């Protein structure tokens, strides 16, 4: 039996509570509030206390999907990446970079947001990038 | 936020408006409880009688969308009584005379007439806020999600500047942001008008800087906002879309329209952890990693940058989002290669001046609030202490404008939207969490008991809610949390989603949709058949 605690930040609201994820043999089994973080000082809300629960949900996506004959079907990473990259290249070549738009994410990390806006701005020479800050 | 969350508990007066803090930001609410225990006065202004209202020293229930009139009236009273801070106004601000011209027209009586709050209550709010030494304003989407959301925010800024309640500990204008990393997504340039750290895409010098940093040709033209992208998909000017970890089919106003727009896309790629309603429309879906499965940083509502750490492996073949973006970019023809999120963060620090002094090494010791310009800078918990970003604080002269959609004979009630305590946004995470799902397995509307009598609806029965854009059927909860003539609903439940009903009317400046007010009709449903009852 291998029990670890990993300090990280809650994925729900903008408070930024720090918490400890309880990891038992590679699976999340619980969440504990961080006592030393000045924001939450050993407390969490009902969402924070349960933030590990959706991680191992059986409905999680585990393989790329491509639409074939109207249905989304499992595909390999190579196939999915080549298909997506090819379609984006075609759109840019045929209709210009402004014909493509990107929605980045208030749930993803800074690093991921940075990369997506860079891909949009450099790859497509457009500023068509937004996210749900307004929503 | 202009100030940090811990400072709230040392305020003398806390003015909460358009924020159901106990539900949406429970740990901020905790600071409000502590401040109350230390003797602070609490003012709550909200069209719903939210939990915080029960402990407020003054609770005022303004009419939906009347915030500008209410705030202008409060400022009129402050000036008339000489409760404003003339020294602060003289030394730190400009535009006061023009502002005063408008404020003069919002006599307490006129403001009261528009916002539905008595002159007496407006005066109590004005006096408490202006005459307490450390007064702080907390607001959220109840202020911003209007067709005049920018006007609302500027009015709050006017109030803080007028009374000099900004740039000092336990004061300020403090938006409580709803998503864990909405601050960070904005900071990183996930917006159509700015590069990372709010550097304008239209500024030639900034563009040159990023062209050098990224070795690329860039566009100086402001891009599309979300709602403009949706319109673009429908009129054909936008052909393809890449969506990272968002579910516009649940979260955008008038979802029937959004769905139609996304279905019009020639190509739609979605990167997400679940097959959301948006992903179901995609041509290709990439399985991504959740927060517990990757390294990185989030930036919270008080601008603190916090570390996110990997605890477990992702399911199946799912990959970290940053790797997916790198792979997609490389195959597209733009090689992108980073060894780790830390390497990406180093690049961020090199182009975003407010992040320049931050590093994983420093953040591993604890969160640091930006601006943090150098490696030895401690971070900045309080903004605008000596000067505003633009130099002097600018007063905006703002006139009240009514909401876009008013009630009429066909749609005689108002709908306003928000969150319920165990759920979050479109429910992708919370409804897939057994403990949270159990707390509230289905959605409902809040309806005033007196309206329920008129409609012949009992508590726990089902009703159909109809707006100009669509209709949904859901359970009814009778409560006087809502005022007569108003219903409240969430967008957590895709099967009965408020955003089928909401109005996509936009603020002219920031393009935020008017989620908080639209006109609807409530119809009684037969509980067993689901068919409309007579009448």
Image (spheres, grey):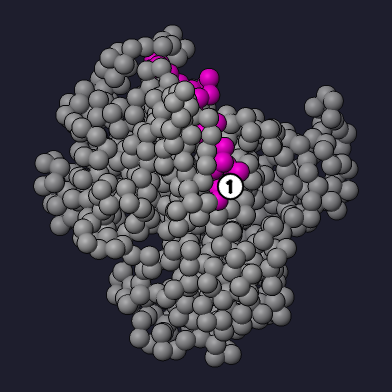
Whether residue B442 is situated above or below residue B390 in the rendered picture: above
> Is residue B401 left or right of B281 when viewed as pictured?
right
* Residue B5 or residue A38, whichever sits in front: A38
The residue drawn where x is 47% and y is 77% is B165
Name of the residue lying farthest toward the top: A69
Residue B93 location (% of width, % of height): 37, 80
Q: Is the magenta stretch mostly helix, strand or loop?
A: loop
Residue B83 location (% of width, % of height): 55, 87
Q: Can residue A130 be seen in this snapshot?
A: no
The residue drawn where x is 68% and y is 68% is B56
Q: Where is mark 1, residue-wise?
A: A45
**Element at label 1:** loop
Q: Give the range drawn in magenta.
A: A43-66
Quadrant placement of the N terminus of chain B: bottom left
Whether residue B30 is situated above or below residue B216 in the rendered picture: below
The chain to which mark 1 is attached is: A
Whether residue B197 is situated above or below residue B503 in the rendered picture: below
* Residue B65 or residue B325, whichever sits in front: B325
The residue drawn where x is 83% and y is 24% is B529
Residue B299 location (% of width, % of height): 38, 50
């Amino acid at each position: 039996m291998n029990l670890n605690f990993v300090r990280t930040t809650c994925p729900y609201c903008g408070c930024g509570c720090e918490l400890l994820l309880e990891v038992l043999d590679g699976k999340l089994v619980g969440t504990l509030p961080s006592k030393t973080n000045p924001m939450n000082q050993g407390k969490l809300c009902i969402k924070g206390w349960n933030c590990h629960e959706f991680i191992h949900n059986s409905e999680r996506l585990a393989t790329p999907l491509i639409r074939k004959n109207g249905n989304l079907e499992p595909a390999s990473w190579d196939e999915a990446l080549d298909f997506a990259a090819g379609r984006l290249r075609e759109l840019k070549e045929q209709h210009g970079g402004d014909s493509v738009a990107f929605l980045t994410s208030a749930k993803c990390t800074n690093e991921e947001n940075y990369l997506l806006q860079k891909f949009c701005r450099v790859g497509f020479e457009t500023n068509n990038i937004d996210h749900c800050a307004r929503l | 936020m202009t100030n940090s969350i811990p400072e709230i508990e040392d305020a003398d007066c806390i003015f909460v408006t358009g924020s159901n803090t106990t539900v949406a930001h429970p740990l901020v609410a905790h600071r409000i409880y502590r401040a109350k225990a230390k003797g602070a006065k609490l003012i709550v202004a909200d069209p719903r009688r939210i939990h915080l209202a029960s402990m407020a020293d003054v609770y005022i229930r303004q009419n939906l969308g009347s915030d500008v009139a209410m705030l202008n009236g409060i400022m009129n009273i402050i000036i008339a009584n000489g409760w404003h801070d003339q020294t602060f106004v003289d030394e730190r601000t400009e535009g006061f005379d023009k502002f005063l011209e408008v404020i003069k027209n919002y006599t307490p009586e006129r403001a009261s007439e528009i916002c539905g709050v008595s002159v007496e209550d407006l005066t109590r709010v004005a006096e408490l806020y202006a005459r307490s030494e450390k007064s702080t304003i907390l607001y959220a989407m109840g202020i911003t999600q209007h067709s005049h959301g920018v006007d609302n925010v500027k009015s709050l800024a006017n109030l803080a500047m007028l009374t000099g309640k900004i740039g000092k500990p336990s004061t300020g204008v403090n938006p409580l942001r709803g998503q864990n990393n909405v601050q960070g997504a904005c900071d990183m340039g996930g917006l159509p008008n700015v590069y990372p750290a709010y550097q304008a895409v239209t500024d030639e010098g900034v563009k040159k800087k990023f062209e050098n940093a990224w070795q690329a040709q860039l566009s100086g033209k402001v891009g599309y906002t979300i709602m403009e992208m949706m319109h673009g998909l429908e009129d054909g000017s936008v052909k393809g879309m890449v969506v990272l970890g968002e579910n516009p089919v649940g979260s955008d106003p008038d979802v029937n329209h959004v769905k139609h727009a996304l279905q019009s896309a020639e190509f739609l790629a979605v990167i997400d952890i679940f097959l959301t309603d948006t992903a179901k429309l995609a041509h290709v879906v990439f399985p991504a990693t959740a927060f517990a499965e990757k390294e990185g940083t989030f930036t919270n509502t008080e601008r603190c940058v916090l570390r996110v750490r990997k605890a477990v492996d992702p399911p199946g073949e799912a990959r970290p989002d940053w790797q997916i973006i790198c792979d997609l970019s490389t195959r597209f023809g733009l090689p992108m290669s980073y060894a780790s999120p830390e390497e990406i963060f180093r690049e961020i620090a090199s182009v975003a001046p407010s992040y320049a002094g931050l590093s994983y090494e420093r953040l591993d010791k604890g969160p640091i609030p930006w601006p943090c310009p150098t490696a030895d800078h401690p971070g900045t918990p309080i903004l605008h202490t000596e000067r505003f970003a633009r130099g002097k604080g600018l007063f905006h002269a703002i006139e009240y404008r009514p909401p876009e959609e008013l009630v009429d004979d066909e749609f005689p009630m108002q709908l306003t939207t928000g969150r319920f305590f165990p759920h979050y946004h479109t429910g992708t995470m919370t409804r897939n969490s057994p403990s949270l799902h159990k707390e509230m397995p289905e959605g409902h509307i809040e309806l005033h008991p007196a309206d329920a009598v008129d409609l012949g609806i009992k508590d726990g029965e089902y009703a159909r809610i109809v707006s100009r854009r669509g209709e949904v059927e859901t359970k009814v909860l009778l409560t006087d949390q809502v005022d007569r003539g108003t219903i409240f609903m969430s967008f957590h439940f895709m099967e009965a989603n408020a955003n089928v009903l909401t109005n996509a009317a936009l603020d002219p400046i920031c393009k935020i949709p008017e989620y908080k007010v639209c006109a609807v009709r409530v119809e009684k449903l037969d509980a067993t058949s689901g068919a409309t009852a007579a009448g």
